[in-house]
Image (cartoon, helix red, strand yellow):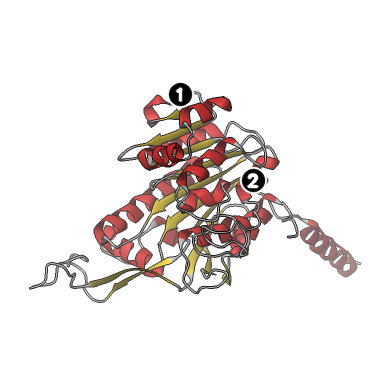
Amino acid sequence: MRKRLFILLLAASFRAAADEKPKLARNVILLLADAAGVPTISAASLFGYQRPQALYIQSWSHIGMSDTSTASDWVTDSAAGMTAIMTGRKTQNGVISQGPDAVRGRKDGVPLKTLLEYAEERGLSTGVLSNVTIADATPAACFAHVSDRGMLGEIFLQLFSPRFGDGVDVLAGPGRKPILASVSALGKDLSAEAAKQGRAVYSSLDEIPSEAQRFLSVTDGSFDLDRAAMMAIRALSKNRKGYFLMIESDAHTDRAEAGLTRLVNFDKLIREIAGMVDLNDTLLLFTADHSFDLRVRGGGQGEPLLKIASGDASKMEFVRVDDSHTGEEVLVLAQGPGAERVNGFFPNTEIFRIMMAAYGWPAEER
């Protein structure tokens, strides 16, 4: 009798475990370190802390490796790389959230629905932040659809004609002068176009009203990504349905010290964000759109990583940098609901599906 009871209880527990649904995310924060391949992440730890695996993101346990190829090339730029991440479809270099039928600058492709647009369609709040020009390829792929990443004016104006919902709620970053110039070249006035939609484009974070739940800010010169992130999360969190937020930090290391410093600082920001949000309902996902040709070739404890080579001030003794993107896989790291789906090797298009599944949303057949 006891044995039978034990078997029945065991079977019941197995059925309960099988019926238990994975916890869904209410919020997703995509943390995009542009050009932060594995060698760059490794170098950032050595540069910032003089020891390996000292970055906060290197403590995360859910780890995968993402292919970064385009629809036709082994090496991607940020436009094709971010399009794959945001839409689940590969496209051509230079193309922003349009299909592989696009011909850069000559022919539009089929518009691809982005994760941000799925979020807007469902009534979530959405945000896009970057410390590079806010109409550049990575942020643009979240909300715009053009055949050439250089179309800054067309990209920015699409903020005011969203295909789903009421458009991006929070957007902030630098690049005011080139964006204004590109909009003007189209015969448009940026302030007037924004006003038609009841919006303003603030020139600094200081101008944004403290209680604003929706704001657009495009600055000249330096930009405080940390402050913008805190402001964005506070604003977006007011939506009970949840939010999607993309935060990009430039980790290109053609200027090694500047690039590694930005990555170390981005890692510190990610630690702060992780302590600010509830990881029971918020998925944090870190990745890069592509890798970069930096390699640590020497050095050791007690020696500065970026030591200048003797006799040649243009070279570093322990680090080699070539000013180019590279085609190897990049890290994908995650914590929070849905993080368990990050494991093994997969294409960059799978990152889109991981985020969709975290929300519990099916992707439309295309």
Q: Nearer the viewer, residue 240 or 158?
A: 158
Say what secondary structure mark 1 lies in: loop
Q: Residue at x 80, y 64 (%)?
A: 14
Residue 125 horizontal/vertical position (percent): 60, 37
Compared with 93, 235 (above or below) is above
Q: How many angstroms separate mark 1 from mark 2 (CA)?
A: 26 Å
Q: Quarter of the image containing the C terminus?
A: bottom right
Q: Is residue 188 visible?
A: yes
The residue lying toward the viewer, choosing from 211 and 45, is: 211
- Residue bearing the label numbered 1: 210
> Percent from the top left, x then y, of residue 359?
67, 50
Residue nearest the viewer, comparing 61 with 63 = 63
**Image quadrant in which the N terminus is located:** bottom right
Give the residue at x 76% y 55%: 20
Q: Which mark is residue 177?
A: none
**Please, is residue 343 above or below residue 83 in the view?**
below
Q: Nearer the viewer, residue 101 or 282?
A: 101
Q: Amino acid at mark 1?
A: Ser
Front disc: 1 or 2? 2
**Secondary structure state at the residue bearing disc 2:** helix
- Picture layout, residue 36 above or below residue 271: below
Q: Do residues under tags 1 and 2 come within 8 Å of each other at their CB atoms?
A: no
Q: Identify the amino acid type marked 2.
A: Glu
Q: Earlier in the sequence, mark 1 or mark 2?
A: 2
Which percent across, then down, holds residue 346?
59, 70
